[in-house]
Amino acid sequence: MTYDEFGEPITQEAVPWYAAPIAAVTSIYQQKQLMDVNAQRAAQGLPPIDASALAPTVNVGLPPAQMQQIMMLGGAALLVLFLATRGKR
């Protein structure tokens, strides 16, 4: 097993820090393009293009169950934050 300079095991190929934000921006841009194409197709009376077949996936290195748990905790934290600041307006 190989270790990085902090003693953490390297389990994936090292990627630059800017790779994930670039991938996210690219994904958003592609989704907007697909939405525009589907709007044009709807105006012509054509069925929409299925986005799930074309959508890129993002691998963050976590199993789906753990990713879902993190998303639920994040949603709960946002809900608590919203409820805590709601009465102060």
Image: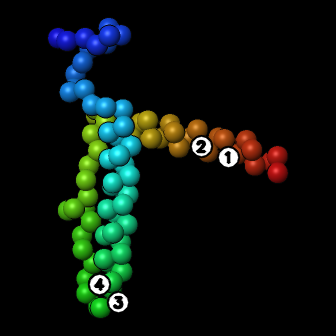
The dot on residue 78 is 2
Q: Nearer the viewer, residue 71 or 48?
A: 48
Q: Nearer the viewer, residue 71 or 11?
A: 11
Mark 3 to mark 2 CA distance (whole Å) = 38 Å
Report the residue at 82% width, 51% height from top: 89
Is residue 66 among the parts visible in the rendering?
Answer: no
Q: Nearer the viewer, mark 3 or mark 2?
A: 3
Q: Secondary structure at mark 3?
A: helix
The earlier-in-sequence mark between 4 and 1 is 4
Mark 2 to mark 4 CA distance (whole Å) = 37 Å
Mark 4 to mark 1 CA distance (whole Å) = 39 Å
Q: Are marks 3 and 4 in contact (CB under 8 Å)?
A: yes
Q: Which residue is mark 4?
A: 41
Q: Which residue is mark 3?
A: 43
Q: Nearer the viewer, mark 2 or mark 4?
A: 4
Q: Secondary structure at mark 2?
A: helix
In this view, 73 is above or below 86: above
The earlier-in-sequence mark between 3 and 2 is 3
Q: Secondary structure at mark 1?
A: helix
The dot on residue 82 is 1
Residue 68 spot, x, y in % from top left: 38, 40
The amino acid type of the residue labelled 1 equals: Phe
The dot on residue 68 is none
The amino acid type of the residue labelled 4 equals: Arg
The earlier-in-sequence mark between 1 and 3 is 3
Residue 77 position by quadrant: top right
In the orientation shown, which residue stands out farthest toward the bottom?
44
